[in-house]
Amino acid sequence: MTTTGRFTIPTEEHFSGKTRELAELWGADAIRNSDGTHLDEEVVALGKKVYAAYFPTRAHNEWITKHMDETPQVYLLTARVLAESADVDVPLMEGFFDEQLRPNRDADPHRYWEVVDRTTGEVVDPARWDLDPESEVVHVHGVTPMHEVTVTFLAYIIWDPVEMYNHLTNDWGDKEHEIPFDIYHPATRRFVMDTFAKWLEDNPDVDVVRFTTFFYQFTLLFDQRRREKVVDWFGCSCTVSPAALDDFEQEYGYRLRPEDFVDGGAYNSAWRVPRKPQRDWIDFLSGFVRRNVKQMADMAHAAGKEAMMFLGDQWIGTEPYKDGFDQLGLDAVVGSIGDGTTTRMIADIPGVKYTEGRFLPYFFPDTFHEGNDPSIEGLDNWRKARRAILRSPIARMGYGGYLSLAAKFPKFVDTVTHIADEFRDLHERTDGQAAEGELEVGVLNCWGRMRSWMAYTVAHALPNKQTRSYYGILEALSGMRVNVRFLSFDDVLEGGVPDDLDVLITGGPVDTAFSGGDVWADPRLVETLRAWVRGGGALVGVGEPSSLARFSPGRYFQLADVFGVDREVCQTLSVDKYFPPVTAEHFITADVPTDPAVVEAANAARAIPLSGCGGGQGGTVGGIDFGEPVADTFPVDEDVTLLRADGGQVQLAAREYGKGRGVYVSGLPYSAANARLLERMLFWASHAEDRYAAWSSSNPECEVAHYPDRGLYCVINNTDRPQTTVVTLGDGTTETLDLDGSAIAWRHIA
């Protein structure tokens, strides 16, 4: 087994001796500096490939302090203020962190700001408000009493959000705050390019320029108590300037409103159904960013260096899944590995020579402190990533942070040694190939390919209460024995469902980008998907799939006939709903323990007609977490196969629809049992039950990856406990394996 390579180790000043020791132990062939650190000459002399973090738009306060009107800007929305008379004062900075943000008084507020009567939605005439010259307060006149008023104002970002986060997390004390700058301004753009050219000359030993990242930070705003206030990993809010707004108007023929950025307080979250101004701004911004990324990549190449982009920090505008990314000349993309979904987000990026994962935990004091065992998080992170790497391999791995902290934890050092060796062994055995997928699965939403592996996300790899029911679908798919792609509703409207797709998954909460919103008011979409399923296609709906916020036309789920399930939204309470018996045994639930007594009791309760989705449904399927409930879902008729219906609503149902099939599930936070349930849904819906057994594991905690071109398969244990599983091979024979915690077992195919 190869014991060196594919590993990037972080280091810091005055730590060269231990760096050498750990580099040998972990088999590192590359070395990098972390935020706020530099490489010692002794470390450079080790002969490893040298990465250098490069920050194009920060760490030069000597420039930006003389040009403070050229920092990035953001539209901020004040709190709603109740007008108790015709005059009302609206404070601007209440709730915002004044060390991070400062109102822009330089550009004419009456041209670039907006006051809105939130009770009516009307824009207040600029003649009726003024910015106080002494304070950060807007005086508004002629307001209707008892109406709420807000101000949307431009603010300078005067502390780089990521440097600020690291500053606060690592307690950097009185270290100078790094001020970001915006290359949209010609003078600053020239400074950035000239500074980079000089840096390239001054750093001949650097092999890889690790751009961290480029120009615009994702939305990361803090409140006055230094807590996160708005965080959106896809947010384009921190990209605005008066010059860019004016250029946009000239290019696109209309002027963006401040409201187009603050979006009523949603700040254009990726969950919002995208609107034309939002899409146009993304296109406009991406065009500008990519032109300048290409210039910097070309400069790096001319200096004999590779250009690597970090998918994080100032990544906004690069859009790696948007058409044309392969033309930027980047050699590699590196990103933080939080779980299987974020692993695939990095691994599947097209148009680069290789991808690299930055594994967790970061070597920061919030994890590496006395009394904690970082090896637990390290192995958990590796298990989550490994199942995805088998399906779509990243080429390299590494860690970030301060090596001196990690070195104090011998158990963690040994854990990383094991992970690095296993990662290299995986590549050596498979030659970097992906495991074979048994089905072609499409994920359908408003964003489509541009948000591949980014759906259902708010912050990087951090699902919350409202998102976990949906994000778990992606996490399950990331390591499942299927091939996955992402489609938009526009794709389906324009070209239909691709012929090679076995099954489509769609859904999310109502009126979001993932369920579709008003796209379902277009009868062409309903027609296309109905025809596809009736002809033999397979559609899996999650949460509130195909939902319209309006009860139209007599349905809430516009494809209720396909799923066999709709939702009562208090419009048809006078119409009785009857639940057919729960089916205790079905292909989809074959791996889920079922209590026959519970099924019998639940079905007996349903002998009484239920009006308006009345209660009485008992537990029928054990070990499954359906996430946050979708209230009052009901079967549209008694031909639906109910597999779970608890608490007066349907959690899981299956439906024959012409030659095809539909499946409804209310939600699936990630777990091994839930991933197994989803896998069985996909195989059943696509009429592939006869293909299910081959290369499967009897134990949901273990998964099988098959490499026919290499004559290999492997079985992984996704837990930290010993597991036993029976693997069914392609010819129907079986093998029983006993696996230690976190183990992987390789076998040759006879």
Image (tube, grey):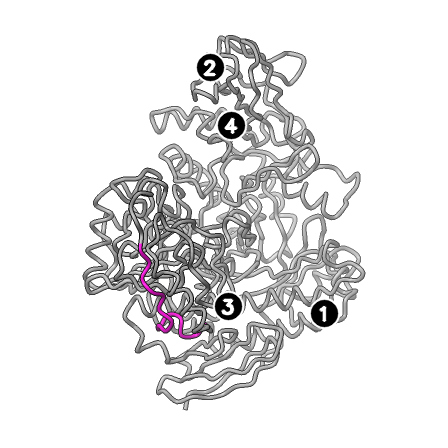
Q: In which image quadrant can residue 443 be found? A: bottom left
What separation in Å lies between label 2 and label 4 (alpha carbons)? 22 Å
Name the spot of residue 738 as percent of width and height, x first: 56, 85
Q: Do the residues labelled 3 and 4 touch (CB within 8 Å)?
A: no
Q: Do the residues labelled 2 and 4 touch (CB within 8 Å)?
A: no
- Start-end of magenta stretch: 578-592
Q: In this view, does 221 lie above or below 322?
A: above
The numbered mark, 1 or 3, whose residue comes first in the sequence reads 1
Name the spot of residue 351 as percent of width and height, x first: 41, 56
Q: How crowded is mark 3: few (under 14 residues within 10 Å), some or many (20 or more)?
A: few
Q: Is residue 604 among what the camera can see?
A: yes
Residue tagged by mark 1?
413
Amino acid type for the residue under numbered disc 2: Val
Tell me what residue is drawn at x 33 percent, y 43 percent.
573
Mark in the foreground, 3 or 4: 3
Could you tell whether 663 is left or right of 431 in the image? left
Question: Is 367 in front, or is 101?
Answer: 367
Amino acid type for the residue under numbered disc 1: Val
What separation in Å lies between label 2 and label 1 (alpha carbons)? 61 Å
Amino acid type for the residue under numbered disc 3: Gly
Q: Is mark 2 on a helix, strand or loop?
A: loop
Name the spot of residue 314 as percent of width and height, x first: 55, 43
